[in-house]
Image: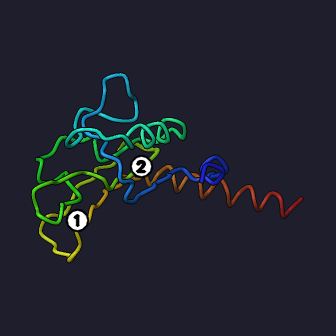
Amino acid sequence: MSKLLFASKASHIILMGDFNAKVGIGNIIESRTSPYGYGTRNSRDDLLVNFAEHHQLKIMNMFFKKKPNRCWTWISPNSTTKNEVDFFLANRPHTDVSAINRLNTGSDHRIIRMSLIIDTKKIAHYVKNNRENKRNLINK
């Protein structure tokens, strides 16, 4: 996966999935987390935080303060333990992630959604420049 991330020319990189890491509340010195996590950390948290740091990705679930019932993504079979183990990682910090608590999927995981804000002016400018560059190559 590292080769794919480093070779990517995309302006937005988004990874999502069940990482089975309980990142919890972030440390002040970590640039890829924030103080708005859910719960306490487990032994796999360092792997995810280091991966995000190495690939310059942010763990987006943690960057916006929200009610605790909008954070947890997994519930134990006896419904006593709730954890946040499903994450979105992105290279752009202007996104918001929340768990959808009104939709029953029949799973022990809840659906999470991410809102992505894209600057369409920048994209239009990029597309226009690429078209002009291709025309110039063809005309040479």
Hey, what amino acid is under mark 2? Leu
Hey, what amino acid is under mark 1? Arg
Which of the image's four quarters has the C terminus? bottom right
Q: Position of residue 130 (x, y in %)?
A: 67, 56
Q: With respect to residue 122, does 34 lie above or below? A: above
Observer-nearest of 129 and 80: 80
Does dot 1 land on a helix, a strand or a loop?
loop
Q: In the image, which is nearer the foreground, mark 1 or mark 2?
A: 1
Q: What's the mark number on residue 89?
A: 2
- Number of labels in the image equals 2
Residue at 84% in and 64% down: 138
Its colouring scheme is: rainbow
Q: What residue did someone put label 1 on?
A: 110
Q: Decide if residue 86 is on the left or right side of residue 102.
A: right
| Residue lying furthest right | 140
Q: Decide if residue 31 is on the left or right side of residue 11.
A: left
